[in-house]
Image (cartoon, grey):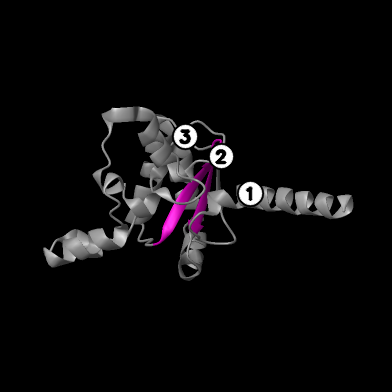
Amino acid sequence: TNASEIKGENRPGYRAIEEAGEKILSPFVEFNVTKEEIREIASNRSLSAANRPSAACLATRIAYGQPITIEALEKIEKAEDYLLSLGFTQFRVRMHSNLARIEVTSKEFEDAFHKKEKISRHLKALGFDYVTLDLEGFRSGSMDEPHMRKKAEEKDETEENEIEEE
């Protein structure tokens, strides 16, 4: 975990680190080292990690209010490993109860659709009851969308009430 990763609404991985107390150290957070600074240091030292794409914590794939368990994380990891083995490059498997919602980029959408039976069969073998392909495609932070909409609606409602009171 680095300093860039602790900003934002849904940071269950960082929340888990905080709850673990002193059992897990986060020196990049403690010394306020950002993702960009880590990449720069790695590049200066010619480390392969300098150009490695970021990978969000698996816990961010689990819907709000759903418990984050080792079993759920392993199921998501195995599902994403499978999609990677099929050649997908930018994707997420989001878990809503026991439904796998797959997000792929628009350029890989057709490929996902053509492989739908194979993907569905494999993910169901992992224990998912339902497997869906998200029509909106891959987007970072999609698990935050319902939460953010609700917050925006509450803010609008509060502002409307304040105007009515004036």
As drawn, which residue projects farthest toward the front? 166
Is the C-beta separation of discs 1 and 2 under 8 Å?
yes
Q: Secondary structure at mark 1?
A: helix
Q: Earlier in the sequence, mark 1 or mark 3?
A: 3
Distance from Cα at disc 1 to Cα at disc 2: 9 Å
Q: Which residue is mark 1?
A: 146
Determine whether, in the image, residue 148 is placed left or right of residue 71: right
Q: Which residue is mark 2?
A: 64
Q: Which residue is mark 3?
A: 127
Q: Residue at x 66, y 49 (%)?
A: 151
Front: mark 1 or 3: 1
- Measured as percent of width and height from the top left, residue 148 is found at 62, 51
Asked whether residue 75 is in view, the answer is no
Distance from Cα at disc 3 to Cα at disc 2: 20 Å
Q: Earlier in the sequence, mark 3 or mark 2?
A: 2
Determine whether, in the image, residue 130 is placed left or right of residue 121: right
Does residue 94 belong to the magenta stretch? yes
Packing grade of label 3 (10 A; few <14, some 14-19, many >=20) is: few
